[in-house]
């Protein structure tokens, strides 16, 4: 019999997953792979994901989706009745027996369906048990877009997460579907887990907008726009807006991903390729000036890189601590030893067929995740769960007080910098945790700035970076010099009173300081610690330096972004950072849940590259099933046809159109007055339309080209067609839908003044928008934390300040 400390994290928990789509399926998968009893409620003819490639042919000749199987490991399947409303009492009884309901009905049925909770039956009052609910919508329950027909592509386009990727002349690159769904699934899982951590207060209901979650993937650019640091243009394939080189280059054999951010990194690259003199050229002195001269740099960089293989360059540049990685094909990715050692790929069983897919990237040891599993056949468990007599109601929960955040009793020590780590910690802060961000006056968060000029210190430029302000809301800020014994002693005292530490230092830093988990867990045996290096710790690649673009490069995803004639393409917005941050937050919440159950601490050894791998699932699985993965396919979709990005009237104006069913296809032909296409029986199926997509694309382009992007979107949405303007991120800041929903909040902060802050991507019925506290200035809360939390006297604090252990002003590093 398993004991409380070694059983799977969610053993004994029952979750109902209802509605279609990869987002809710992935959220359910996260629960199921950690031991929850997840009951997937499907339509009578099965989830639409059962028809999503890559497909398997089982021994009985039936085709089955391998991707569906991966998304639904370790779940139970129950089919709904063919006629609406024919379930009777069993569905209500089933819902009331659950601890959590993951509800995606609104994606297909519209947001009005959320007024009819599954567990409520005919009456909605006095039902006794109210499960935790997390509801997924395309655009939220309110606002001008709330009734829009949505798809991942449409949400992404309207969120500003498409426009800046791709060739200058367009069309922009549309990342393959499932990627936004994975991010939304992680967000839904995190919301439910936070509610479970606070279930002593009662149940909670969160409504999530996939549109707003998609915006979180480009949130960095919102800060750059407000600071005037964004080029306000699409710069081209593998061109990153703030530095160069930051892309993917062909070598003698294979592709190498480079990301030169700092001056020393640029100098190291120049020396490695045999052009040290280029590091002295003032035109290339900083990232923003190098991107202006990107063509000149590439003129000597491209031929130099073709002198060695990708593997050889990887070894050379890694020795120089330069952020470089092999950009693997799916075949190469599956063979990389580091991933094999970490168990990054697991066996999935679908019928009689087995294949490999990415593991859930939240490693908790004996608490999960399961190493793969099998997917249930349609309605395999229907008889059991339709038996009302066998369904025992869950322990009664009433709704929690609307202003009670679920993590308000949790304390977090935040030892993170940049985007991914601070986003992970911010997630806990948004759910009410007390997050104490620890910096140093000599080593402030590098997202405050990396150009350490006189102005950086004299004009306090480190307090004027909007990216830092966006990513560190809802936190307290203190400073401690952790290179000195006095600073470390204060940190030990703080850790002793904390529940969790989150850190994303290079793997060698904390052990060198004597602050690794082995030491900190002696101070606090209940401590949870989440570490977030690029490839995880304890392996041959643990010390690799990485930025968000590096993580994307290392995942192999660029081989499936863009058009066949182009090189493997980055998305151009540090994709790996927000993905790593979302997963880091989920890992922290999950580990806290296990701590709450067992009373024991643990170290979570996260790999941020591994966090990207679920987004590669269609291609990894295809490689495993068929021995190869299809090449880049542009902006098309495996099921939706037609789908693409189409030109509109005006300069660099575009609209996404994504036809998801026959009704939308007929509506499109009606809007375009294309009677000839309507009479063509070969176009009645998606397969028939895909076979003639170039012809259809020309017809759609002719229609959209006569209209503005906004007009085209409005006409198409009026007809019930999934369509969205491809919005530049700088226009998203004034998007009417997000404005009406108060997603952006005018916030005042010292040194910046008023700026637009984002708000959390979850909403509750009572509070439209969660409260937002501005990011701290350097050491702003030294006095509060040291006195209130640690009980230090004013004299003790003054002594620390005299000795330079704490402070509120950045100081130069020792030469």
Image (cartoon, grey):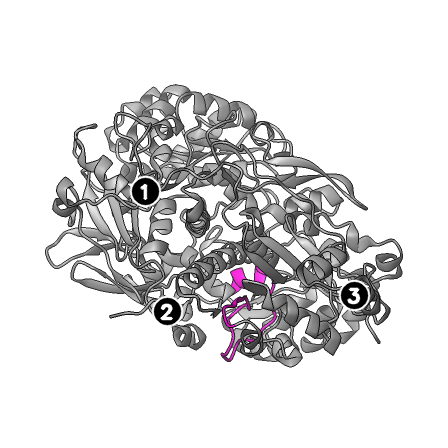
Tell which tag, 1 or 3, sits nearer the viewer.
1
Q: According to the image, label 2 marks what residue? A: 5
Q: CA distance from mark 3 to mark 2?
A: 38 Å
Q: Nearer the viewer, residue 559 or 393?
A: 393
Q: Earlier in the sequence, mark 3 or mark 2?
A: 2
Residue 621 in which image quadrant: bottom left
Q: Give the x, y percent position of residue 297.
A: 71, 63
Residues in magenta, as a range: 525-554
Q: According to the image, label 3 marks what residue? A: 806
Q: Is residue 711 above or below residue 355?
A: above
Q: Nearer the viewer, residue 559 or 582?
A: 582
Q: Residue at x 70, y 62 (%)?
A: 791
Q: Earlier in the sequence, mark 1 or mark 2?
A: 2
- Dot 3, how many residues are within 10 Å of its Cα: few (below 14), some (14-19), or many (20+)? many
Q: Give the x, y percent position of residue 613.
A: 43, 61
Q: CA distance from mark 1 to mark 2?
A: 25 Å
Determine whether label 1 and label 3 are within 8 Å by CB: no
Give the overall secondary structure of the magenta segment.
loop
Residue 45 visible: yes
- Dot 2, how many residues are within 10 Å of its Cα: few (below 14), some (14-19), or many (20+)? some
Q: Residue at x 49, y 67 (%)?
A: 607
- Whether the magenta-drawn stretch holds residue 542 is answered as yes
Residue 278 in which image quadrant: bottom right
Marking on residue 396: 1
- Dot 1, how many residues are within 10 Å of its Cα: few (below 14), some (14-19), or many (20+)? some
């Amino acid at each position: 019999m398993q004991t409380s400390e070694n059983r799977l994290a969610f053993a004994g928990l029952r979750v109902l997953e209802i509605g279609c789509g990869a987002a809710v399926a992935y959220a359910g998968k996260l629960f199921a792979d950690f031991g929850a009893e997840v009951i997937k409620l499907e339509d009578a003819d099965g989830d639409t994901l059962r028809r999503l490639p890559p497909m398997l042919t089982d021994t009985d000749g039936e085709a089955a989706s391998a991707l569906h199987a991966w998304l639904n490991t370790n779940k139970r399947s129950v089919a709904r009745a063919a006629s609406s409303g024919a379930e009777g009492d069993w569905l209500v009884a089933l819902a009331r027996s659950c601890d959590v309901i993951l509800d995606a009905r609104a994606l297909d049925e519209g947001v009005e369906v959320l007024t009819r909770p599954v567990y409520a039956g005919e009456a909605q009052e006095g039902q006794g048990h109210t499960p935790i609910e997390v509801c997924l919508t395309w655009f939220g329950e309110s606002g001008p877009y709330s009734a829009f027909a949505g798809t991942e592509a449409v949400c992404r386009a309207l969120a500003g997460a498409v426009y800046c990727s791709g060739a200058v002349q367009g069309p922009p690159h549309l990342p393959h579907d499932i990627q936004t769904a994975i991010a939304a699934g992680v967000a839904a899982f995190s919301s439910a887990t936070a509610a479970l951590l606070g279930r002593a207060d009662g149940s909670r209901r969160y409504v999530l907008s996939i549109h707003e979650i998609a915006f979180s993937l480009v949130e960095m650019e919102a800060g750059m726009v407000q600071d005037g640091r964004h080029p306000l243009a699409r710069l081209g394939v593998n061109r990153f807006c703030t530095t160069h080189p930051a892309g993917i280059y062909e070598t003698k054999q294979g592709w190498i991903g480079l990301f030169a951010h700092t001056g020393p990194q640029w100098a190291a690259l120049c020396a490695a390729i045999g052009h040290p003199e280029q590091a002295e050229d003032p035109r290339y002195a900083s990232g923003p000036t190098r991107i202006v001269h990107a063509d000149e740099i590439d003129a000597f960089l491209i031929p130099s890189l073709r002198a060695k293989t990708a593997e050889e360059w990887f070894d050379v540049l890694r020795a120089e601590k330069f952020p470089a990685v092999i950009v693997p094909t799916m075949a190469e990715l599956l063979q990389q030893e580091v991933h094999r050692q970490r168990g990054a790929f697991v066996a999935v069983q679908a019928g009689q067929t087995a294949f490999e897919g990415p593991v859930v990237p939240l490693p908790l040891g004996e608490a999960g995740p399961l190493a793969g599993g099998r997917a249930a056949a349609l309605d395999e468990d229907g008889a059991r769960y339709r038996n009302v007599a066998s369904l025992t109601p869950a322990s009664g929960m009433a709704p929690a007080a609307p202003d009670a955040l679920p993590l308000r009793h949790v304390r977090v020590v935040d030892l993170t910098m940049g985007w991914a780590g601070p986003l992970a910690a911010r997630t806990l802060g948004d759910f009410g945790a007390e997050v104490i961000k620890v910096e140093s006056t000599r080593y402030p968060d590098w997202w405050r700035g990396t150009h350490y000029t006189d102005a950086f210190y004299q004009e306090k430029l480190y307090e004027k970076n909007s990216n830092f302000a966006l990513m560190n809301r809802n936190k307290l800020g203190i400073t401690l010099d952790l290179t000195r014994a006095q600073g470390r002693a204060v940190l030990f005292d703080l850790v002793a009173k904390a529940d969790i530490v989150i850190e994303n230092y290079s793997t060698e830093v904390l052990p060198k300081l004597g602050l690794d988990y082995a030491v900190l867990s002696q101070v606090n045996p209940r401590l949870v610690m989440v570490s977030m290096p690029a490839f995880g710790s304890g392996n041959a690649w643990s010390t690799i330096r990485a930025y968000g673009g590096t993580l994307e490069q290392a995942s192999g995803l660029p081989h499936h972004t863009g058009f066949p004639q182009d090189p493997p393409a980055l998305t151009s917005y540090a994709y790996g950072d927000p993905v790593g941050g979302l997963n880091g937050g989920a890992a922290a919440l999950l580990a806290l849940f296990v701590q709450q159950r067992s009373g024991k601490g643990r170290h979570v050894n996260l790999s941020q590259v591994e966090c990207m791998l679920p987004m590669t699932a269609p291609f990894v699985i295809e490689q495993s099933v068929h021995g190869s993965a299809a090449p880049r396919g542009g902006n098309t979709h495996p099921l939706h046809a037609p789908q693409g990005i189409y030109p509109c009237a005006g300069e660099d104006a575009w609209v996404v159109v994504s036809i998801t069913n026959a009704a939308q296809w007929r509506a499109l032909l009606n809007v375009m007055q294309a009677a000839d296409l309507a009479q063509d029986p070969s176009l009645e199926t998606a397969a028939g339309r895909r076979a003639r997509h170039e012809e259809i694309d020309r017809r759609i382009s002719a229609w959209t080209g006569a209209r503005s992007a906004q007009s085209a979107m409005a006409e198409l949405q009026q007809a019930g067609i999934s369509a969205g303007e491809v919005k530049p991120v700088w226009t998203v800041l004034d998007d009417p839908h997000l404005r009406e929903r108060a997603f952006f909040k005018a916030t005042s902060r010292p040194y910046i003044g008023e700026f637009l802050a984002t708000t959390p991507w979850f909403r509750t019925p009572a509070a439209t928008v969660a409260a937002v506290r501005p990011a701290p200035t350097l050491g702003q809360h030294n006095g509060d934390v040291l006195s209130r939390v640690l009980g230090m006297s004013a004299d003790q604090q003054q002594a620390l300040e005299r000795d330079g252990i704490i402070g509120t002003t950045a100081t130069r590093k020792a030469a």
